[in-house]
Image (cartoon, rainbow, N blue to C red):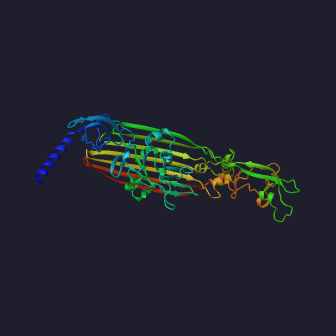
Amino acid sequence: MSRTRWTLFALAVFVVGFARVAQAQGTVTGRITAEGNIPLADARVLVVSTTVSATTNEDGRFTLKGVPSGTFDIQALHVGFQSQKKSVTVTAGSTTNADFVMKQAVVQLEEVVTTATGQQRRVELGNAIQTLGNVNKKVEETPITSMQDLLQSKAPGVNVLSGSVTGGTPTIRVRGVSSINLSNAPIWVVDGVRYNTNTFGTAGQTNISLLNNLSPEEIEDIEIVKGPSAATLYGTNAANGVVVVTTKKGRAGSTRWTFTGESRTLDDRNNYQAQYANFGHRNGSTASIRCQLPQMVTPKFGFADGATCASDSVTSYNYLEDPDVTFIKLGRGSLFGTQVSGGTDAVRFFVNGSMDNEFGVVQMPAGDINYYDQVLHVPVTNSMFHPRQQQKYNLRSNLTAQLSPKFDITAQAGFGKSSNTIEPDNSLIIGLLYVGQAGYGWKGCPKGTETTGCGMTGADGKAFTDPTGFPLNEANSFAPGDIMQYVTTDDILRFTGSTTLNYRPVTWLQNEGTIGLDWRTSTCFTCVA
């Protein structure tokens, strides 16, 4: 047989084989709609356990070609809707119909996530992505008042250490500690725009976080990206992970109003350590004095008769847990907000406004208030009475307009104002924790020591007033009311906005562009009464 005949024979075999394969395949068509017979464009349809897939057009219709013969599950996926599966039987050379009516879901990112290459099923990704699920339900049903509360114990591998004071900076780690001297904090992206979460100092060692300007009430979904796709999307700055925040959007339908009212209590449940004091007498004397431990075990310089103090009794006192003098009280907070959303298929809107006020667990003791009123004749201001407090005001508006079947635009704007007040703290000798925790070990004067300054004489004599003349009332060195007149207050005004354009010239090509702004101004000053 000549070479030409062999070529014609091989070609005939190939054509026959291809025809048989084509005859062994079928086609699946259908339409995907939302409740109310609304077509869903750009929904993904795939044949489970095969590589066959398609996307829906503007009318919600799809066509799956080259489906092998047999019974298969057809799965429909769309962000914001619950995924659905339907079993169909495909016969060779025939067309099978499969329609889907999908139900809305607040978040459907646990099955479909967005990467640099487009939407993918979560099981197809080689990196770790967590979503917080139904954020709106968590905010409504659990005591969440800040972003640190929203992230606390909500996602595996995300460690959150709450701030120590009202408005304090939380420590958030997504991928652990990766650097000794550089920041280990993740970056934040809100509606496609980089969100500044830097901190700035106030008094002592307490920092205030710009993350406080983000309100949990206006968030629809939070996605935490830890794997390689974080660097793919956001560059090397994402080495510590990315927290992607999506705010709420309006949905077509009747206008919906939501009102929020909340009252909460803050309680310091730390068990503070009591202080102890030892009282006794000198050798050959019955006068009660305070015995220092070295005096009982080591001869004092200049004395040859050994220890200079014999112990008679031990007293203890816990200033921070004494309700008569302590500055630790119950803190309180309140939240009021309103949301409205709705629109049509062409234009959808969402507006949120909220006001959150909170004062911490530190409050000026009654004895210091009386000294201001009766001796100094100076009124006690709100910032002096509650030196740890925060006020937040948030307003957000999101608008989506579909200008044509192939072009839509989304505009988002957020305005926030926050004010934080805090007293000197931490390592400063005039810090409240120091003057309360470093007590003398007794309240008043132990019996028998009234005439000797409670057993403290000479250079060790107990000062019953601080250097400015305030009565100590069992505190050490400085009266709490004296410290509370020196507060640091910051005021932050912040505006964030973004515009997203989405253009789909053909069904298989989507172009999206986002431009945004994150602007803030802050004022920080120290007030002295």
Depth check: 261 or 320 in front? Answer: 320
Q: Position of residue 60 (x, y in %)?
A: 27, 39
Answer whether residue 98 is visible to the viewer in this image: no
Residue at the image point whose x is 62% and y is 47% from the top: 363
Task: Give the tally of numbered discs.
Answer: 0
Determine whether 195 is above or below 138 in the image.
Answer: below
Determine whether 518 is above or below 366 in the image.
Answer: below
Image quarter (top left, top right, bottom left or bottom right) of the C terminus: bottom right
**In the shown orientation, is residue 205 left or right of residue 82?**
right
Depth check: 443 or 24 in front? Answer: 24
Answer whether residue 275 is visible to the viewer in this image: yes
Q: Position of residue 1 (x, y in %)?
A: 11, 51
**In the shown orientation, is residue 244 left or right of residue 372?**
left
Determine whether 308 is above or below 30 in the image.
Answer: below
Q: Residue furthest bottom?
A: 302
Q: Residue furthest front?
A: 1
Q: Position of residue 158 (x, y in %)?
A: 48, 49
Depth check: 113 or 479 in front? Answer: 113
Residue at the image point whose x is 84% and y is 61% from the top: 306
Depth check: 70 or 394 in front? Answer: 70
- Which quadrant of the structure image shows residue 78? top left
